[in-house]
Amino acid sequence: MPRRRERDGTHPREGVGRERLFTRRPVPFLMGGMGPSWGTCPSCGAFVVGPPPCPTCGYVPPSARSAPARPVLIPKSGFANAYEAVQAKLWRRTRRGLLLTAIGLLISWIPFVAVVSVFFLSFGSTFLFLGARAAGRKHEVCVVLAFLMLAVGGVVIGILLGAFLLEAYGAARAGLPLSTIRDIAGLLVWGTLPATFVISAAFASQVVTLLPRRQAFTLLGLCGLLAATATLATWFSGSEVVALGAVPIRTATVADFLFRISVYRLVEAPAYVGLAILHVMAYWELSAPGGTAGASAVPRAEPE
C-alpha cells in the first residue's frame, strides 16, 4: 500500500510522487565542441539527444545562437591609395588651370594689359591640359581640343602681329610713311578675327563638361556674344587702317595705331567677363566638399 500511494502521488509527504522523484535537473545542451550534446531542455524539460534546437519546443540555448556577423572592413590596397593620389593631383591641376584662365579672361580686353593676360591664359590652358583626365574621357577630349585650338589661334595671331611689326620696322628704317603698311595692317585686323572665333570656342570647350546643363546654354550664348562683338570691333578698326596716311613711321606712331585698334576691343568686355565668371564657377564647384568626382569610392578601414 505505501508503495502504491507513493506511485500514485498520494503519500502524505508532499512532492514525493513518481514524477517528482524521476525528474532530472535541466542540463543545457549545446552544439558539439561547446558542451554536451545531450540533456534536458531547460524550457520544456524533455530529454534531448543531439544538438539544438529542442525537437519538442524548438528551444535554442543562447550560447548556441549565432551572433550577428560584424561587417568585414577591407582596407584599401596600395593601388587604391596610388589612384587617389593621382586623382587628387589631377584635380589640383584642373582647379589651378581654371583660376589662371579666369584671371587671364578678366584682363584680356584691357588695352596693353592684354599682353599680360597671354601668360595667364597660356599657363591656365597648360594646367588644364595636364589635369584633363580628372573628370573622365569626355572632359579630356574637350580639353585637348581646346588646347589645340588655343595653340592654333595664338600662333596665327602671333604670326600676323610679328609680320606687321617686321614690315613696320623695315619701313621705318627706310623712312617710309604709315600708308605703306596699310595692307599688312588690314591683314592684322581682319586676319585675327577667325583666330578670335577659334579661341572663344576653345575657352568654352575647357569648361563645358564641368558646368551644369543650364549653364552650358549660357556658355554658348557668351561664345556667340564674343563672336559678334569681335566682328563689330574689327569693323570699327578698319577705319583706323584707312586713316593711315603720310605720317612717317616711328615707334610712337606704330604704338598709337595698335592702341587705337585695341580700344575697340573694349566692346568684347562683357563676353570675356562672362566667360571668366563661368570658369570661376567651375573652380568653386570643384573646390567644394565632394566636388571632385574622380575621388575614389573605396571605403576607409576604421580601427578596431
Image (cartoon, grey):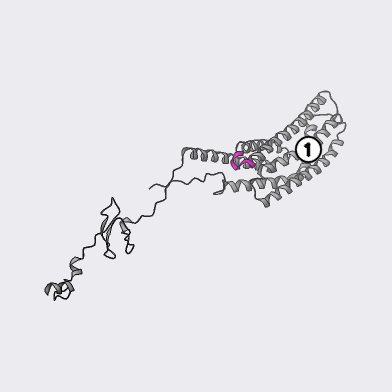
Residue 42 screen position, x and y as percent: 27, 63
User: In this orientation, which residue lies closer to the viewer: 302 or 193?
Assistant: 302
Quarter that holds the N terminus? bottom left
Check disc 1 and give the amino acid type. Answer: Pro
User: In this orientation, which residue lies closer to the viewer: 263 or 136?
Assistant: 136
The residue furthest top is: 174
Quadrant location of residue 175? top right
Residue 69 screen position, x and y as percent: 39, 52
Q: In terms of secondary structure, what is the magenta stretch mainly?
A: helix
User: In this orientation, which residue lies closer to the viewer: 267 or 65?
Assistant: 65
Residue 58 screen position, x and y as percent: 34, 62
Question: Is residue 109 in view from this perspective?
Answer: no
Left or right position of 92 against 47? right
Left or right position of 98 against 88? right
Query: Magenta segment: does it hold 133?
Result: yes
Q: In what element is the residue under mark 1? A: helix
The residue furthest left is: 2
Count of marks overlaid on the render: 1
Quadrant location of residue 178? top right
Query: What span is colored magenta in the figure?
Result: 131-138
Q: Is residue 63 above or below residue 181?
A: below
Identify residue for label 1.
194
Left or right position of 130 against 274? left
At a point 66% along the width and 39% down the height, the residue shown is: 141
At a point 71% along the width and 36% down the height, the residue shown is: 149
Query: Magenta segment: does it hold 78?
Result: no
Question: Is residue 261 in view from this perspective?
Answer: yes
User: In this orientation, which residue lies closer to the viewer: 233 or 201?
Assistant: 201
Residue 229 screen position, x and y as percent: 78, 45
Tell me the crowding category of disc 1: few under 14, some 14 to 19, or many 20 or more residues within 10 angstroms, Cα based. Answer: some
Left or right position of 154 against 129? right
